[in-house]
Every structure is written in structure tokens, then in C-alpha cells.
Amino acid sequence: MSFLDPAFTPAWSRLTADRVEPEITTALAQAQQRIDAVATQDRSRLTFASVLTALDDATETLDRAWSRVTHLDAVCNAQALRAAHNAMLPKVTDFYTRISLNEELWRMLQAYAATPEAKALTGTRRRFLTETLENFRESGADLPPAGKRELERLNSELSAATQKFSENVLDATNAWELVVTDEARLAGLPESARSAARQSFLQKNPDAGERPGWRFTLHTPSYLPLMKHAQDDNLRRTAWTAATGVGRQAPYDNAALMQQILALRQAKAVLLGRPHFPDLVLGRRMAKSGANALKFVENLHQRIVAEFAVEQKALEAFKAARTGQPAGPLEPWEATYWAEQRRRAEYHFDEEELRPYFSIERVINGLFRLTETLFDVKLIERPTIFLEPGQNRTTPEGAVEVWHPEVKFYELRDRDGRHLGSFFADWHPRESKRGGAWMDALETGGPRTGGKFAPHLGLIAGNLTAPVAGQPALLTHDEVSTIFHEFGHLLHHLFGTVEIKALNGIHVTWDFVELPSQILENWTWERGGLDFFARHYQTGEPLPPALLEKMRAARNYLAASGMMRQLAFGKMDLELHLHAALHPPADLEAWLREKMAAYTARYRTEPPTIAAKFTHLFANPVGYAAGYYSYKWAEVLDADAFTRFQREGILNPATGKSFRDTILAQGNSAPPEELFRKFLGRDPDPQALFIRCGLAGGPN
């Protein structure tokens, strides 16, 4: 098997670095031949199938092969694979750029658009034609030859620069570790964090025996408990200094790359007739423009800024009362610790109490049962096998090969047995895997000719708490929410029923794509949802009512601060692309701190911004760039949409069916505003978000 093999599930062990260059080169040549065939066909016999369907299918082999390469680069990063990926990245980028710059193809599309058949198209087919024409225009189809060459250069350089940014963050994160040999310094750390740190130390030092040692890294399951619970101020300061230094120090300094990426995006926007990058990427999203996105962020900021200030003052006063010191700004490495101490004091709630009720196996199984109840489907785990890369063994019949021993594989089927799709799940951190959590589509299926249905293939990945010797992985509630979030994205992909791949599943506007993921998080706060999985990993007892009450009472603790953090990221993103990209400041970091002053807490030591490791913005040519506001935009949508479930029953299959039919199944077959109105019956009301967060919110 190779990267080009159309088999539904790849033989990952055979997808080795040495295959990347020859096989992607072959896929590029095949795709080009198909594009040329579409572009040069007889203009007198143009049809929807010969033009739009053929164009949608032309890159299928390349899409599949390259997605496998980029996936392995994300989860099994190694020197040989990285080199092979980076060698082909410019060629793949250039190919996709040239599709919309192909003058003969563009003339053919315009010729088809003028035919009687095209003018008579309705529904999804009409939308596909419209979207295709707009995609071409926004990607430079109308540029003169010199402009097209310049756009190719810009896109190629953007791909290389953003890939290097991502690699720097990964390498800098993996380069740091902190080994503690004095157990007294671990005071305050919960047993789960101590055990994980001890296990990490022994894995790195297998001959250590009984020698004391606890190893901490910058991966979230290791770093966050340290910042939340460690009483040792110097320990937290050391870890914080390392974390905020990611992307800021040689040999992984991203400063020049950020400036380069911003400049390239700005040049691309101007070349394509837009004043700046946000207007280029947001024109067909729900926000419509950079100015509207910034207005949205600033409006929410104004509605919570007073409550944000009250929360910060209260935290400072709490620390002063506990330490006997005068009230004043905290150090940045103190904030998470004192916030946790105050939550425990005021709500008598320690999030660690929840871990025994959130074993990852129960969470996953409960999520599946909840999904089956709500959407009338069946989820089935399939046997898997892991083979070392290059190992020439045949996969046993019935087993699915995976890229790591911890990876699981599942099927999603309708109650009538129809195979809707399958997916891989990879939940725990390792040094060869990029940070964060994500969902990705490996195959987009859907309706096919003759009434057939092709199943979808996807994956979900994360960096959650790993199992410690003798017990399963016990998660925080935030990690449970992460699983639900990524699974919401996955369902959006797997439930897609649009006949056109380019409009199916998650291929929707970026500020709508987070609705299916964020709405699913709501069930992790409801007794009806928690009852599916929140049981003690040893006794099987359900989550006690008193603990649930404390958890829900503490839900909106520092709610304004949590919202402000997200707004700060959106504000930073838009300021960078609306202003810094046009007029580069001499000191980007100092400029950002000034712009973000009203969005951040006061600290005794001014912390650096997240910009140098902000992979959402800088690890992809587009990604969330000029679109980070989407998280909060979609949160408004999800809070309001969930009110229907609250009215009709959070486990009501009829409401679940409506959400599946009007949102999850529809992809980009209609404008997102129209889909939302079909489900809720009206436009979204931002007040639902403030009610859920327990914030006054002020006027709209």
C-alpha cells in the first residue's frame, strides 16, 4: 500500500518517508492531467458533471495522499518525515494555487456559467457553481499573468514560513523539561500530577530505580497542574518562564517569521484587491469584514470589562487576605494558583475531586451512548493493530491498522445499518505529536450515483492526561469538554449528506464551523448528559449530587476573565492583521502589549503575549488567521441553539434529529444564517451566552 492507495483505511506502517516524494509527485502529475482534461473539453458540450463534478474529483487522489502525509507529520513527527514533507510542501502549495490561476480553466468555468443548464441550476448545485466561481475570483483568477506569478510566490512562501513556525513551537516545547529531586517541592500537587511526573521521569530514566525524580514538561497535562496547585512559587515561576519563552528564543525564535507571515498575507490581500487580509478571508463568512469582526469583539469586551475588573480585584484581595501582604497586582505565575485556591475556598470545590469520575474509557463510551440516544445511530469499536513503520506484515482480517498503539478505531452506523463513517481517536501526548486537540477529515463521503452512500473517514486527536501505572487515564472536566468538542466536529463530518464533496461536512464558513463542536460541550454540564459517563472508575458509583452541585456552582467562577481571555486572542489576531500588517511596528511585542492592555489583567511583572507560539494564527497559511473571533462568535450561536434542547429535553431524539438534519447534515449547502434559522426559527440572540455565563452583559 502507498499514499496513493484508495483503500478506505490506510496501512500506516507502509506510509514511510521515502515514499512521500515519488508518490506525491505522481499524484501531482495525475491531478494536473485531470485538471487539463476539464479545462480543454469541448465548450459546446459542457455539463455540470463534466465541469463541476469533474473539477471536484480531479484532485481526489492528491487530496487523500497529501492529507495522509500532513497527518503523519502531526502525529508521528520525525526527522526523515519532516524533511520529506517540507521538500514537497512548496510543490503541493504551488499546484493548488495554480488551479484558480489556470486561465483556460477559468474561461471554461465562465463559459459553463453562461449556459442554459447552469442558469437553471437550483439548490445545492446552484450554490456549488456560485461558490466555485467566487473561490476562483478570490484566489486570483482575474489577475494578469504577472499578478498570478506573484500570488504563486506569496502562497509558496506562506506555506514554508507557517510550517517552520509550527515546527519551532513543537521543538521548543519538547526541548524543555524540569526534573525535581526534592519531593518537598511538590507540596500542593495532587497525587495524579505527582504520579504522572514520576512516571515521566522513569520513562526517561529507566535505570533510576528508587532514585527520587519527578519530570515536568510544557505539555498541558504536565504544565497546568503545576501552575494550578504547586505551592512552590519558584517552581511555578520556572515553568511559566519556560512556557512564555516558547517561540521567543534561538534556535526556535519566531519573531522574524511572524513579521514575514503578516507581510505575506498583507501583500496577498492587496494583490487580490482587498485593503487587508481580514477583508480577504471574511468576505463570505458570517462576519463579512474585518471591521465587523473587530466590532463584534469590542462590543463583547465593553459588556464584560467592568465585571472583569471586579474579578481581578477580588483575586488580588483574596491573596492579600491569605498571605497578610498588601493587596496589589499578582505575578503572572501566581494567577492560576491563587484562582484555584479561591475557587476551593469559595465553592469548597477542588476539580481534582472529579477525576475519579472521568476515566477516559467511561467518558468515551458514555459520549457514544449519548450520541446514539440523541441522533439514533450506533457506534462500534473495531479491533486495531499497530505495526512499526516499514514492517512488512499483513494486517489480520477484521483489524484496522493504526499509527500508534494507543490509537482506537470506530464505526458510526445508522440504525438501519448504513455505514455513515469511521474514525481514529488518538488522545494522549507524546513528543512526536503536535500540541492541542483537533479533528480532521481523511475522506469525505456522502451520496453517490445510483443511490449509494460512501462512508466518511475522520480522526480526533488531543493531548489529554495519560494513564498512570495501575489506573486508567483520569481526566479533568476541561479535558472531558475537549473530547466532546472535537467529537462535535467529527459528527459534523460524519453526518454530512451533501452530494458534492466540496460542500459536505465541515467545509463551511469558519465562523460557523465551531457551532457543532461547542454545542456538544453543553451536555458535560447537564445531569442528563453526565449520567452517561460520570461514574467512579473503581466503584461505578455515579457522580454524587453534592459534587455536581459544587461543580455547577463553580462553573461561572471568573466567567468574565475566561471570556476576556478569548476576546483577547481575537483582538490580538485582528489588530495584527488589520493594523500591524499594514504598518509594521518597530517592536511588535511592545505594540501588541499596548493594544491588549484593556484586555489583560494587571500583573506585577508584565508577561509577554502569546503571539510567538500562537499556532492558531501562524501555523497555517490561513487557518484561524483573522478568524480567531470565530470561537466566541460560534459560542453565541451554540448558547442560543442549546436553549431549544433545554426547552424540549436535552435527550429528546426529535430535537436531536432536527439538529442533525438542519445543521450537521447540511454542510455548506446553504448559507449558515439560513441553516441556523431553520433549526431555531430565528436569528441568534447574544443574550443567551451572557445568561449561560452568569454575566450581566449590559446592553447589546
Image (tube, rainbow, N blue to C red):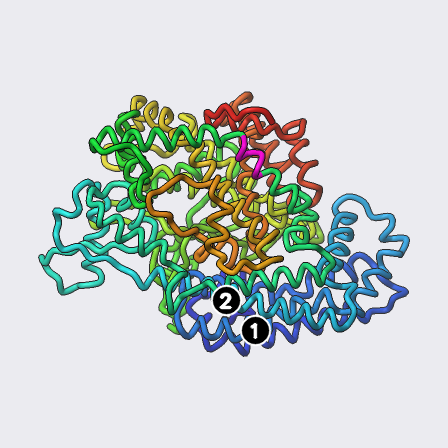
The image shows residue 534 at horizontal and vertical percentages of 34, 33
**Which quadrant is the C terminus positioned in?**
top right
- Magenta segment, which residues? 297-302
Question: Mark 1 — residue?
Answer: 24
Q: 10 Å neighbourhood of mark 1: few (<14), some, or many (≥20)?
A: many
Amino acid type for the residue under numbered disc 2 = Val
Q: Main secondary structure of the magenta part?
A: helix
Q: Amino acid at mark 1?
A: Ile
Residue 523 vs residue 565, the one in the foreground: 565
Does 2 appear above or below 469?
Answer: below
Q: Which mark is residue 514?
A: none
- For the residues marked 1 and 2, what is the alpha-carbon distance in whole angstroms? 9 Å
Q: Where does label 2 land, which residue?
A: 69
Q: Can residue 273 be seen?
A: yes
| Helix, strand or loop status at disc 2 | helix
Residue 183 shown in magenta: no
